[in-house]
Image (cartoon, rainbow, N blue to C red):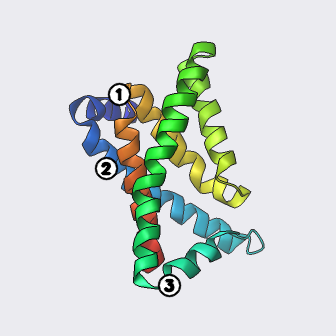
Amino acid sequence: MLMNWLNKKVAESPYKLAIIGGIVISIVASVVMANVQSWLPSFDSEGLSAVDQLLAGPPLIVAILLFIIVIVSPILEEIFFRKFLWRISSFLFSQTTTLIIISLLFVAVHGSLFHAIGILPITLFFGWLRIKTGSIKHCTVAHMVNNATASLFFFL
């Protein structure tokens, strides 16, 4: 039932779903990661302390970093993963297998096991959008919104 509703929403307004989905999936992933970290305090979020320090820096550095995180990285990552690698993988495998392969590669590139917990559902959502729309435009928008929402959490 949920999938039918989502398929209908993709057909009606893929950008709206990308924006709302990007926000929701970012919040869900952040909550899950926070809970995992509270249950397993030794399961550290390595690498995030460096970002925290940069986001607490001078305004120009913060603006440049946010531009890279919210605009540049999503564009480059979507072109590489859900356009270039997706095209190669889809010649060899089904859409579902391609979704899994690309999602696992995306998680692997983003580093730690701690990050994987939050990134896996996010990248699966981006890939699902890629399958449903046949384009990287909508998953790029969702990626930008996700990164913007996650960045906002640093300031709250």
Q: Which residue is mark 1?
A: 133
Quadrant the N terminus occupies: top left
- Mark 2 element type: helix
Between the residue at mark 1 and the residue at mark 2, the CA separation in whole angstroms equals 14 Å
Mark with earlier residue (3, 2): 2
In the picture of the structure, the residue carrying the numbered disc 2 is 19
Determine contact: label 1, label 2, CB under 8 Å. no
Circle 3 sits on which residue?
57
Foreground label between 3 and 1: 3
Q: Is residue 94 above or below residue 86?
A: above
- Distance from disc 3 to disc 2, alpha carbons, whole Å, reads 29 Å
Q: Within the image, what quadrant is residue 50 found in? A: bottom right
* Residue at horizontal 41 percent and vertical 59 percent from the top: 70
Residue 20 in picture, x, y percent from top left: 31, 51
For the point 64% across and 58% down, the residue is: 115
Q: Earlier in the sequence, mark 1 or mark 2?
A: 2
Picture coordinates of residue 96, whole percent (x, y): 56, 24
Q: CA distance from mark 3 to mark 1?
A: 39 Å
Q: Can residue 24 be seen in the rendering of this structure? A: no
Total numbered labels placed on residues in the image: 3
What amino acid does circle 3 point to? Answer: Gly
Q: In the drawing, does residue 99 fall left or right of residue 13? A: right
Point out residue 116 in the picture as x, y percentages from the top left corner.
Answer: 66, 53
From the viewer's perspective, is residue 130 above or below residue 109? above
Mark 2 neighbour density, 10 Å: few (under 14) some (14–19) many (20 or more): some
Residue 134: x, y in percent? 38, 24
Vertical arrangement, residue 60 with respect to residue 96, above or below = below
Q: Residues within 10 Å of mark 1 (few under 14, many from 20)?
A: some
Q: Nearer the viewer, residue 136 or 2?
A: 136
